[in-house]
Amino acid sequence: MPAISASAPGKVILFGEHAVVYGRPALAVPIFEVQAKAIVMADPRATPGTVRIQAPGIDLDAPLAELPDQDPIAVAIKNVLATLNISRAPAFTLRITSTIPIAAGLGSGAAVSVAVIRALSTFLGSPLVAEQVSALAYEVEKIHHGTPSGIDNTVITYGKPVYFKRHNSDRVTLEVFGIRRPFRLVIADSGIPSPTAEVVAEVRQRWQVAKPAYERLFDEIGAIVEAARQAIEKGYVERLGALMNENQRLLDEMGVSSPQLERLICAARQAGASGAKLSGAGRGGNMIALVSDETAEVVMQALQQAGARRIILTTVSQR
């Protein structure tokens, strides 16, 4: 049996992080410059049901049976087997590689889950459809993030720009939206891991203590998301910079920025970016900056000088 592989892109949230957990919309786009890849290889000499997992990026090489019950990779595998009603799979080795930085707001965990779910279900002869892949990846996201919005697994599964809004645990608005004019983003890693679950939990604690203030913040961010979607769909990409800056102001007021992120954001703006903001949970991870063909190189140099650990230039377009 030939090896089966599947890959999944990274992602960035353009607008709406944190507010999306509280029923407001968010916009996110896939980033194909970085990807996670899963390869499933049959091991006909091993006993059926024997599964070995190799993930050199995190120094993992172990049988599935030895992993903790709540290990994300183990949960992804077990959920696929349960969905397909397979009690004992043919013996196989699962190898996972990724170029997506971990804990940087680029959806590393969700991308690994999506790649694993797709590769494994195909290997087992029953490729899951996108809706099933996203749903299983969302279950793994709960391990990574506690109370995830669902946006990471959604945009990564579909590989399209996504408008996302979770109304409750059972109802979600998911719309792939059009991009009238391509635009360019610089993504810069602060070099500090973003503790997503911790930050999300802290925001929830503050919201519980000061609901009116945080509901106002979430409402304002929701309005920015709607304005940004309209601008993207109509081709008014020059409006996005000011919207990014305003979204960042609200995130800072929410308490999820950091001195390192602020340093990068200021450096990008001073170098000519028309807008810049953190992307993801905050406190670390990545920031994004809206650039033009003329300003991209200067902004990337400024970010490097300001301490960015890794810089990605991507074009957001309709694929």
Image (cartoon, rainbow, N blue to C red):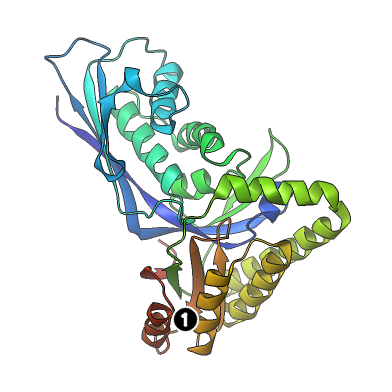
Estimate the x, y position of residue 62 in percent, counting from the top left.
27, 26
Q: Is residue 299 above or below residue 95?
A: below
| Vertical order, 180 against 86 (above or below) | below
Residue at the left extreme, as displayed: 45
Tell me how many marks there are. 1
At 43% from the left edge and 69% from the top edge, which residue is drawn? Answer: 188
Q: Could you tell me if residue 151 is visible in this image?
A: no
Q: Which residue is mark 1?
A: 291
What residue is rendered at 46% in x and 50% in y?
Answer: 107
For residue 254, side relative to residue 307 (left or right): right
Q: In this view of the protein, can residue 21 be seen by the observer?
A: yes
Is 116 left, or right, of 241 in this rendering?
left
Asked if residue 211 lies left or right of residue 266, the reply is right
SS for dot 1: strand
Q: Residue placed at 40% from the left, 59% from the top?
A: 31
Toward the right, the furthest residue is 212
* Residue at the image position 44 percent from the left and 32 percent from the top: 72
Quarter that holds the C terminus: bottom left
Is residue 197 positioned above or below 92 on the image? below
Q: What's the amino acid at mark 1? A: Val
User: Residue 84, image x and y in percent?
Assistant: 41, 18
